[in-house]
Image (cartoon, helix red, strand yellow):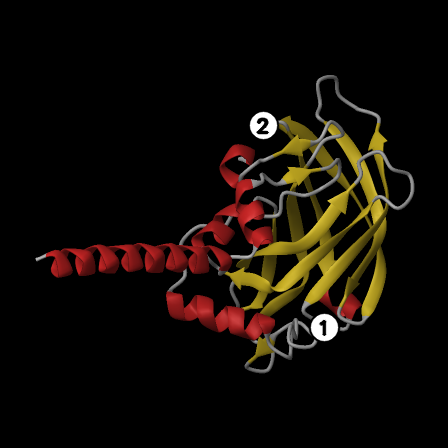
Amino acid sequence: MRLRSNRTFHDSACGGRRLRALLMALAMAFPACERATAQTPISYSAGDLHLPSTRVFALVGKTGLGHEHGVLGRLKSGRLNLGATCDAGELVFDMSSFTADTDQARRLVGLSGSSSDSTRKQVTTTMLGRDVLNVGQYPTAVFKIDSATPERPTVEGQPQRYRLSGQFTLQRTARPLSFLAEVTSKNGWNLVRGSFPLKQSEYGIKPYSKAFGAVGVADEMTVWGELWVAPATGVAGQTSAAVR
């Protein structure tokens, strides 16, 4: 009986040591930087964008018997220094993120109704393909912002507006771009909204058409942006829910 008891104690002690060793191995499987990141809130400096909440959308017109389309996409990175007269920031568009005719995209650009899953996939595939955006070769577009200067309000109580001016590069073509953006304060962030027209042909893109031009999309589209920008005081530990 004593031998069995000693063996039981020995087995228990070995099992405890094995359990501790296993727990230590599991802890070491996660690098210290990852453990620290999980516990450290993300901090934002003035001009940083909250990318999960920032979005870009566009209304693509039609020609002939074609259909209007709503397109929604995201930014890959970006900064915007409101009030800067030089080197005011940069917006990098993630072209592969753009999708066509989701219910949200159509609603944002003022289109009614819904598109079927097969239609959405077909239009998106065509849009991202070699003959249009060619995202395989040109995965990003860039708006290099030279200045973001305030405009004098024309109506009392009107939200502050800024003129964003710089150079927009799509595929291999860079062209000057300037437009007005409206800035409001929401949930401790600067919500920047603006839009500009864009002609595909000016960037070397031939607007899609088929059936000898009887069905197609218009050359000019309208692009909108909703940017969530950290104010000069800085914002820390925000999440998408907190921003919106």
Query: Which residue is under mark 1?
Result: 205
Label 2 or label 1, whichever lies nearer to me, is 2
Give the x, y percent position of residue 121. 45, 70
The kind of secondary structure element at disc 1 is loop
Q: Mark 2 sits on what residue?
A: 187
Query: Element at badge 2?
Result: loop
Classify residue 122 as left or right of residue 163: left
Label 2 vs label 1: CA separation? 39 Å
Rate crowding at label 1 as few (under 14), some (14 to 19) or many (20 or more) other CA atoms within 10 Å. some
Camera-side residue: 25 or 132? Answer: 25
Query: Relative to 95, does residue 187 appear above or below in the rendering?
Result: above
Q: Give, as a three-letter code, the residue at label 2.
A: Asn
Q: Residue furthest right?
A: 86
Residue plotted at (64% across, 72% down): 135
As drawn, the residue found furthest toward the top would be 156
Residue lying at 65% horizontally and 46% vertically, measured from the top left: 225
Q: Is residue 65 visible?
A: no
Q: Nearer the viewer, residue 105 or 141?
A: 141
